[in-house]
Amino acid sequence: MHETELISYEEWLHLETELLGDVVIIFVLSSAVLFLFHRIRLPAILGYLITGIIAGPQCLGLIRSLDQVAVLAEIGVILLLFTVGIEISLKDLLQIKRFVLVGGFLQVLFTTLAVVFILVNLGRPFGEAIAIGFMVSLSSTAIVLRIIQQRGEFDALHGRTILGILIFQDVIVVPMMLLIPMLPGAAVATAESPIFIIIKAALLIAVVIAGAKWAVPRILYQVLKTRDHELFLLFTVGMCFAIAWISSFVGLSLGLGAFLAGLVISESPYSLHAIGNIRPLRDAFSSFFFVSIGMLLDLDLLMKNTAYIIALSICVILIKTIACGLATSLIGLPTRLVVLVSLALSQVGEFSFILSKVGLDAGLLSHEVYQLFLDVTVLTMAATTFMIAISHRVAAGISQLSRYDALERIGKQHALKDHLIIVGFGVNGRNVAMAARAKGIPYVVVDLNPDIVKGCV
């Protein structure tokens, strides 16, 4: 009996040492790569992806505990989405509900339909085409939000629109997972009712909203009264993982649960204190996620089919950009913001890995199609930093081309005289508008948010 326990302990110790060695390799190698990328002014996320490629099984094979590294990567995604939730509030989320519901739905619908149309006309089975359409329609929440955070664009309208569409994608991934095994050609069927999943999700959201309004602010106040920094950190991180676990338990994603946990904290007066404590943990663990993505790249397949895979990646980026552009145009965004949002969401996301595994297990995807999809996904993710970096210049160029037409249309409208021009309709802008109305002075509101402008008409 003692011998069995001794062997079990030795195996555990070996796994622990192996994981520690992998962590050291990732930190040391990524530090070296990031230092080099900083010197040549390349994005940090691209450096993490390169680190994963170098250390992964397809290159040097330095990382042995791939499954355990994947767990650390999941923790990074949870903490990243937790901080995203803290940085906005339920009030902010309600303000972008149109972007979440309408914009997100249209983006997923148009992308899926475009992919299905192309694949069916190329002779692929209908069930496989729908599954791939679902997979391609999702964008990378972790990568895009990390870049938006670093660029300080969360409070901009395009940043909120991007967030709204990504939230919809994170929610819709659950029905997609349930639908894929039901598609024509699938070898297995799902066991759980979609209605039951929706009921559980609604209950979770109701509990989170109730907690955000009443319970959590009071508990945080009592925790802060102790003046114990460690206690506050443990409580916030513990709440994050608890709600993420509950979310996963009811059939939603861990990331969505972490985002909801962040929303709970955001409703309290202590949100800035919380995010200041969490940020170092988030940055450390999120590096594992980006490195793990690089490890998925099959270099052998890429070398044998370089031109084909690159061409597929470009096609995916174009399809997603056009589909997202059409969706955001229909919800009333101006041309400049349409370009910014579309280019930011032009990659395939991390939840697509989950859908592709479901499709593989259901018999809809062959192993070759599965690995090809992984390579294309990693390449589109690697291109994200470049797409977002050029998005402002592309948007400015396209806006310049359409500006003359807009000026001509404005010139044909009735002329205004002795009026005010209110630039920005925040608190001060509203006060000026109230004073102008009281005095009977006509005014024009200029604001990037189309909902605000529409409300002024």
Image: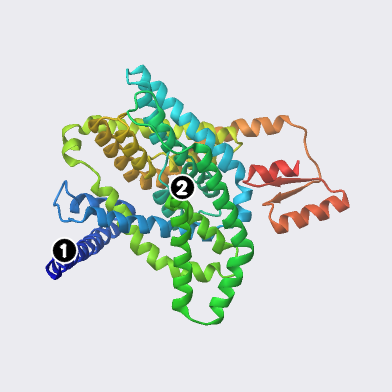
Which mark, by number, is residue 252? Answer: 2
Using the image, tell me which numbered label, if any, was put on residue 133: none
Determine which of the numbered discs, if any, sits on residue 11 in the image.
1
Instruction: Work out how far the residue at label 1 is from the one at label 2, CA to CA, in angstroms.
Output: 34 Å
Q: Position of residue 293 (x, y in %)?
A: 29, 48
| Left or right of residue 433, residue 242 in this image | left
Give the crowd class for mark 1: few <14, some 14-19, many >=20 residues within 10 Å. Answer: few
Q: Amino acid type of disc 2?
A: Leu
Residue shown at 47%/31% (left/top)? 323
Residue 127 vs residue 2, the one in the foreground: 2
Residue situated furthest front in the rendering: 1
Position of residue 423 in the picture relative to residue 391 (left or right): right
Q: Is residue 447 above or below residue 224?
A: above
Residue positioned 62% across, 46% down in the render: 448
Residue 121: % across, % down: 36, 17
Label 2 crowd (10 A; few <14 / some 14-19 / many >=20): many
Q: Could you say which quadrant of the image residue 316 lies in?
A: top left
Q: Residue at x 55, y 38 (%)?
A: 103
Mark with earlier residue (1, 2): 1
Kindly tell me whether residue 371 is visible in this rendering: yes
Nearest the viewer among 428 and 418 is 428
Callout 1, which amino acid?
Answer: Glu
- SS state under label 1: helix
Name the residue located 68 percent from the left edge and 55 percent from the top edge: 426
Tell how many labels.
Answer: 2
For marks 1 and 2, give the one nearer the viewer.
1
**Residue 41 visible in image:** no
Q: Left or right of 332: which side holds 171?
A: left
- Point out residue 226 in the picture as x, y percentages from the top left corner: 53, 82
